[in-house]
């Protein structure tokens, strides 16, 4: 099965490739573009990227398995990424994560990303998001939220439709 | 009275200041670039001629600017190592992979005043004959990447980027490259591997010094966001004026990220060494002190890799006395000037300028467990001592933080940490072991007490007496 990449996306990817003297350099940017479009990186997406760049699929797979932001399975429509690292932990990051999990019926002690059965929400801990002065911080998809109280977290949940 | 000195962040928080190019131009933006590109050839007293490029490199060297990413190495020297005779293209990469826990300064520049970085980069590229440059921004900053792309487009439209910049014949293209969540990409050779489309396994040095064998095995300069922004100011005010800011060998300003248990966490730009660690934490112009009723327990002075300081620690520092002679003076933790050299003499480092403050409510074992989990997660896995050791330390600390500590744990942790540092390709090995070494040594009694308490609890529960006291 091959990947159906819309022409506009492929044109965007071709532009990205043109930014580098060596095609392989565009790997991460292409994977971002494909994951943004498809929601995750399938085997087909990996093979498509490899063919596009003249690489073996393993050269792309090893990136997908290494870099934490890439995923090989779908995640929720709304992905909550809560910072786990020290400054946020001192500022209530774990309570925030626990509160979100409890509201969504997820297990706060489980390792890794968790998605609600309806596929709407994912919650995961991530490492330092670099806004330690406004702890605790979280990201909802690409939006950044600082100094998030449990109440605000609930408000964020209810805004996700 | 200790206060901020805003140079790089001078405009960032002004009401109505926006990150677009029109606003930047209204505030004198890109004037310095024009000046740099038009520098006439200068004749030196010894009759030698100095090109515009050489003059800029000279200014940056004379300014005393030290890299703001973590190592604090002279930016001018770093540039001087570039192999300019190889015949290969020279690349410049802006390291915007801001990931050292506690650090959030580059975010301010990128989000609030991105053109300042772009201008600094163009000047740095011109000075080093670079025609293709990248901004490697961490994947978790999608908004920052958008702002930078917008800034680059606007600069291109105005003729500051592209072919024949401002009619001078200088060509330069800058692209934004996004990372994907790996801390190790902040290590410059790991970053280069990542930019080549590979796993970011750091390269061994020698031979892979970026200045000689960097991106695509070509000479490459990797500079931090704040460092490149400072280049713009050095060229605007001149190296002489810039080096009057700060203190000798610790010149200029730097943006300190303050987080943890203070009333006013945030970013503060200071003259390097003109403000003490105590003032940063307690003075109303900075952290404003601890939360009410709390006492200081510990300070991590330069990002989570830096060795921790314990409240009340005293250090012996070498200082030049009024008579010009070097003398050893005893300095309290809170009186340490916040600069590169003093913190290093005190056994830690100012690193990325990130101060994490912990008050007496902090569980020190839990705090170290948190840090070690970070390093276990982020080890790239290339070197065995780091890959295995970082995980062992994290597992032991997780166990200790969850009521199953043992008396032998502190020594176990120390022995693992000692066997990582110095035995890895990159400095991540030190970054993972320094927190463990310093936490356990300085707060030994808490680790010991935890082991003793949990072992006796377990002994009571199982009806067995502990094997050793």
Image (spheres, rainbow, N blue to C red):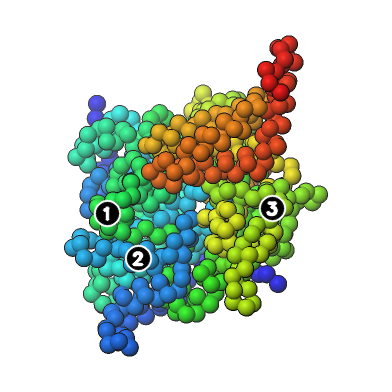
Q: Which corner quadrant of the image does residue B231 belong to? A: bottom left
Chain of the residue that carries numbered disc 2 in the rendered image:
B
Say whether residue B326 is visible. Answer: yes
| Coordinates of residue B349 in the picture (x, y in percent) | 55, 55
Compared with B400, B241 (above or below) is below
Give above or below for B436 relative to B225. above
Q: Which badge, 1 or 2, is on the more N-terminal residue? A: 2
Instruction: Pick the quarter of the image with the N terminus of chain A.
Output: top left
Kindly identify which residue carries mark 3: B313
Q: Chain of mark 3?
A: B
Q: In x, y percent, where is residue B401?
A: 64, 30
Q: For the view shown, which residue lies furthest in the right direction?
A: B293
Mark 1: secondary structure: helix
Badge 3: how crowded within 10 Å, few (<14), some, or many (20+)? few
Q: Secondary structure at mark 3?
A: loop
Q: Nearer the viewer, residue B468 or B367?
A: B468
Mark 1 vs 3: CB contact within 8 A: no
Q: Which residue is mark 2?
A: B79
Mark 2, Cα crowd under 10 Å, few <14 / some 14-19 / many 20+, is many
């Amino acid at each position: 099965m091959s990947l159906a990449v819309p022409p506009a996306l492929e044109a965007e990817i071709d532009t990205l490739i043109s930014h580098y003297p060596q095609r392989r350099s565009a790997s991460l940017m292409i994977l971002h573009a494909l994951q943004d479009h498809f929601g995750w990186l399938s085997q087909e997406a990996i093979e498509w990227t490899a063919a596009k760049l003249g690489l073996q699929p393993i050269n792309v797979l090893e990136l997908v398995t290494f870099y934490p932001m890439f995923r090989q399975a779908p995640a929720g429509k709304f992905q909550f990424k809560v910072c786990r690292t020290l400054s946020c932990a001192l500022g209530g990051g774990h309570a925030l994560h626990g509160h979100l999990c409890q509201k969504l019926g997820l297990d706060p002690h489980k390792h890794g990303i968790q998605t609600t059965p309806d596929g709407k929400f994912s919650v995961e801990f991530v490492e330092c998001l670099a806004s330690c002065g406004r702890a605790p911080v979280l990201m909802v998809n690409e939006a950044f939220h600082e100094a998030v109280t449990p109440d605000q977290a609930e408000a964020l949940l209810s805004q996700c439709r | 009275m200790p206060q901020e000195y805003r140079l790089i962040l001078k405009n960032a928080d002004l009401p109505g200041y926006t990150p677009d190019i029109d606003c930047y131009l209204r505030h004198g933006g890109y004037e310095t670039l024009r000046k740099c590109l038009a520098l006439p050839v200068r004749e030196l007293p010894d009759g030698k001629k100095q090109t515009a490029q050489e003059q800029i490199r000279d200014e940056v060297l004379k300014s005393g600017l030290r890299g703001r990413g973590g190592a604090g190495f002279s930016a001018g020297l770093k540039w001087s190592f570039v192999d300019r005779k190889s015949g290969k293209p020279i690349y410049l990469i802006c390291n915007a992979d801001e990931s050292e826990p506690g650090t959030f300064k580059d975010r301010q520049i990128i989000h609030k005043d991105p053109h300042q970085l772009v201008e600094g980069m163009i000047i740095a590229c011109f000075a080093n004959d670079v025609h293709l440059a990248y901004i490697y921004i961490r994947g978790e900053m999608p908004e920052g990447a958008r702002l930078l792309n917008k800034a680059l487009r606007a600069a291109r439209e105005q003729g500051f980027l592209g072919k024949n910049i401002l009619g001078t014949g200088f060509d330069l293209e800058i692209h934004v490259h996004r990372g994907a969540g790996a801390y190790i990409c902040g290590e410059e050779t790991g970053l280069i591997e990542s930019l080549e489309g590979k796993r970011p396994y750091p390269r061994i040095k020698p031979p892979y010094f970026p200045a000689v064998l960097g991106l695509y095995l070509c000479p490459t300069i990797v500079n931090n966001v704040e460092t490149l922004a400072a280049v713009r100011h050095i060229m605007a005010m001149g190296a002489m004026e810039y080096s009057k800011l700060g203190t000798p060998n610790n010149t200029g300003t730097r943006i300190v990220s303050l987080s943890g248990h203070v009333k006013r966490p945030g970013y503060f730009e200071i003259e390097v060494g003109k403000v003490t660690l105590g003032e940063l934490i307690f003075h109303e112009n900075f952290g404003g002190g601890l939360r009410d009723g709390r006492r200081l327990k510990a300070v991590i002075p330069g990002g989570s890799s830096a060795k921790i300081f314990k409240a009340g620690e005293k250090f012996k520092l070498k200082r030049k006395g009024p008579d010009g002679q070097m003398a050893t003076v005893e300095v309290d933790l809170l009186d340490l000037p916040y600069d590169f050299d003093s913190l290093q003499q005190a056994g830690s480092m100012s690193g990325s300028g990130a101060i994490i403050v912990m008050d007496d409510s902090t569980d020190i074992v839990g705090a170290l467990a948190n840090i070690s989990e970070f390093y276990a997660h982020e080890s790239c896995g290339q070197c065995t001592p780091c890959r295995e050791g970082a995980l062992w330390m994290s597992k032991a600390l997780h166990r200790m933080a969850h009521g199953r500590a043992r008396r032998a744990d502190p020594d176990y942790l120390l022995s693992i940490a000692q066997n990582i540092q110095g035995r890895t390709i990159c400095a991540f090995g030190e970054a993972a072991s320094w927190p463990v070494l310093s936490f356990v040594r300085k707060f030994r009694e808490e680790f010991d007490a935890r082991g003793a308490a949990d072992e006796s609890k377990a002994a009571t529960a199982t009806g067995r007496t502990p094997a050793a006291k």
